[in-house]
Image: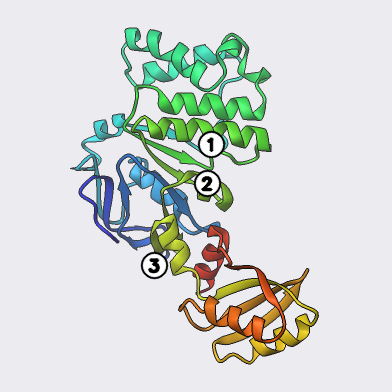
Amino acid sequence: MVEHNNSIIKTKKLKKRYYGNTYAVNGIDLEIEEGKITGFLGPNGAGKSTTIKMLLGLLEPTEGEIYVFNKRLTPDNPRIRKGIGYMPELPKFPNYLTGQELLRIYGELQFVPEKQLDKEIPELLEEVNLYKDKDRKIKEYSKGMQQRIGLAAAFLGNPKLIILDEPTIGLDPVGMSDIKNIIKSKAKGGTTIFLSSHLLKEVEEMCDNVIIINKGTILASGTINEVIKKGTSKNVLEIEVDGKSIDKIANSLKNLPYVDELNISNGIISLTLNTKEDIRYEVSKLVVENGGFVLMMKYKNVSLEEAFLEILNG
């Protein structure tokens, strides 16, 4: 774990044991950097939900320490949680309430002053694009609208940290885009966002940092690029050539000592390399020597999803 002086949450050797010697979380050192969007990734049963519940003070750790806003979180100082907004996975709300009634009740439960709620509620409804629906019953809200009112509830009181559990789950592309834009807008305003998600493409588009957890332990953490680099064991060079004999060119390339594998698909030659060195000049020269010339050559970009799977299977 790379330590930051501006960490908003930090854990030390955090553990949670449920039955016997079964650990849902097994000694993780987690750090959430202030002012960033951090994605929390892992397969089902990895320990994500248990970790989030401990960070919120809803579960007491078996071992280890949690620091929130540079103060240790313990059962006797629950008011630390006042600075944290939270939206659970697939939030459920009373169907008989309107959108603004819901926010009013949630704000009162969080001891947000009435005058502050009078100002915040219309602003939040506007921010999540629900102001025109503020007097509609929750039972009339679509799934996407319920996710958005859940976000607004998490934003009440202007918390410094917001924890979101699967904020875009089950939404159509339009709903996903709305939620992503709201989250990114909030982060631009200086709010720290910590979100758990199975949708790695969405995480890659939204997040600054990412943490990958499996079987209760952290496998990788850092910026998106750092984690992708850690999960990339294969270096693939893609080449498009113009020449009468692509097979002749391909055979020459295949014999290079740093080429482990060669594939041709839709006129693109893909070389899987056993070196991280830049060998594009040497490849270009070989293509020309075999009667062709290069139309395109680039190293294949690895997605967060590809890196994630490689790290899990590592």
Image quarter for residue 226?
Answer: bottom left
Q: Marks 1/2: CA distance?
A: 9 Å
Choose the circle earlier in sequence order: 2 or 3: 3
- Label 2 sits on a secondary structure element that is helix
Image quarter for residue 22?
Answer: bottom left
Choose the circle earlier in sequence order: 3 or 1: 3
In the image, is 112 to the left or to the right of 227? left
Q: Which residue is at a point 58% across and 39% down the rendered structure image?
A: 168
Q: Amino acid at mark 3?
A: Asn
Counting from the top left corner in percent of width and height, residue 293 is at 68, 75
Counting from the top left corner in percent of width and height, residue 146 is at 59, 26
Q: Which residue is at a point 77% across and 84% down the rendered structure image?
A: 247
Tell me the quadrant of the picture where the N terminus can be found.
Answer: bottom left
Choose the circle earlier in sequence order: 1 or 2: 1
The disc at residue 21 is 3
Q: Amino acid at mark 1?
A: Lys
- Label 1 sits on a secondary structure element that is helix
Residue where numbered disc 2 is placed: 205
Q: Which residue is at a point 56% across and 52% down the rendered structure image?
A: 200
